Image: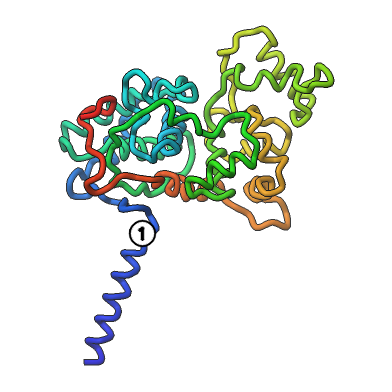
Amino acid sequence: MGFSCFSQRVVLVSLLLAIAGVLVEGQGTRVGFYSTSCPRVESIVRSAVQSHFRSDPTVAPGLLRMHFHDCFVNGCDASILIDGAGTEKTAPPNLLLRGYEAIDDAKTQLEAACPGVVSCADILALAARDSVVVSGGASWAVPTGRRDGTVSQASDAANLPGFRDSVDLQKQKFAAKGLNTQDLVTLVGGHTIGTSACQFFRYRLYNFTTTGNGADPSIASAFVSQLQALCPQNGDGTRRIGLDTGSVNRFDNSFFANLRDGKGILESDQMLWNDASTKNVVQRFLGIRGLLGLTFNIEFGRSMVKMSNIEVKTGTAGEIRKVCSKIN
């Protein structure tokens, strides 16, 4: 009898731990959701991302940003992928996103392998992870089980974090999605890969202050002249510059070293070094002596899992789109 009670207790504890694990992962999502219904889902998405990355490396940061922009607008429901006038895809912050072809490719293959099973939202979450991996970052387990949203409006994208947002505003926008200050700094660290057009930061290089013709004083003086050469005052505003100088295509923590050195490209990025609450997190990623260190690759995966569970649709909510760009 005693052994039986003990066994029941062990089973109960194990069950509670398993349930807790699922709850930690998110609102109904879990790792291995498709293990029986579509066991090849991760390998198919990974192969599609790798194939498109080989022909165009900008696909990786594009897919990572796309997932971020999707999750911050009505949750991670692939509403960013829907075509049409007035959809999220047409909103100004989303006009330069790229990587849609990789998602469509993965979806086509998955519909052939297991039709009507895998959501576009899950494909996007997996593709974002695989984009980090092909760029040299570490992998993480992606909880799946999201369903696709049926609403996509450009006006809903108005509150996406912006390149001129103060740290306080950035923190407010992240907190509204259940993400804390460490998550903010960690996820902005995704700018370790990718580029920005001159039009989004050139104002920092010329006539930044009202008192003169100088540049943003938070930019290292030697770096100002480099950026001015790349982005002349009346030059091509669409010219693209790496967000992580010296390591634009490599997923690493050098982005944070650039912030420390006054080489942040976007004003909102550089501000993370100038605010005490976010500077502390940046310093921990850099291993500053006297502070408890953080490992960027590990923390990035953790924060991505948190972000990927923002307001997800599961169970009977939403739908499983047959084509990612069209509502069924």
Residue at horizontal 32%, vertical 70%? 16
Question: Amino acid type of disc 1?
Answer: Leu
Residue 178 in view in this figure:
yes
Secondary structure state at the residue bearing disc 1: helix
Measuring from the top left, give residue 82's x and y in whole percent: 32, 26
Measuring from the top left, give residue 108's x and y in whole percent: 22, 28
- Looking at the picture, does residue 73 appear above or below residue 11? above
Measuring from the top left, give residue 311's x and y in whole percent: 38, 45
Q: How is the image coloured?
A: rainbow
In the picture, the quarter occupied by the C terminus is top left
Q: Is residue 74 left or right of residue 160?
A: left
Quadrant of residue 98 within the rendered picture: top left
Residue that extends furthest to the front in the rendered view of this protein: 155
In the picture, the quarter occupied by the N terminus is bottom left
Residue at horizontal 61%, vertical 39%? 169
Nearest the eye: 232 or 254: 232
Nearest the eye: 227 or 50: 227
- Residue under label 1: 23
Residue at horizontal 63%, vertical 54%? 293
Marker count (numbered): 1
Measuring from the top left, give residue 112's x and y in whole percent: 16, 31
Q: Is residue 183 left or right of residue 275?
A: left
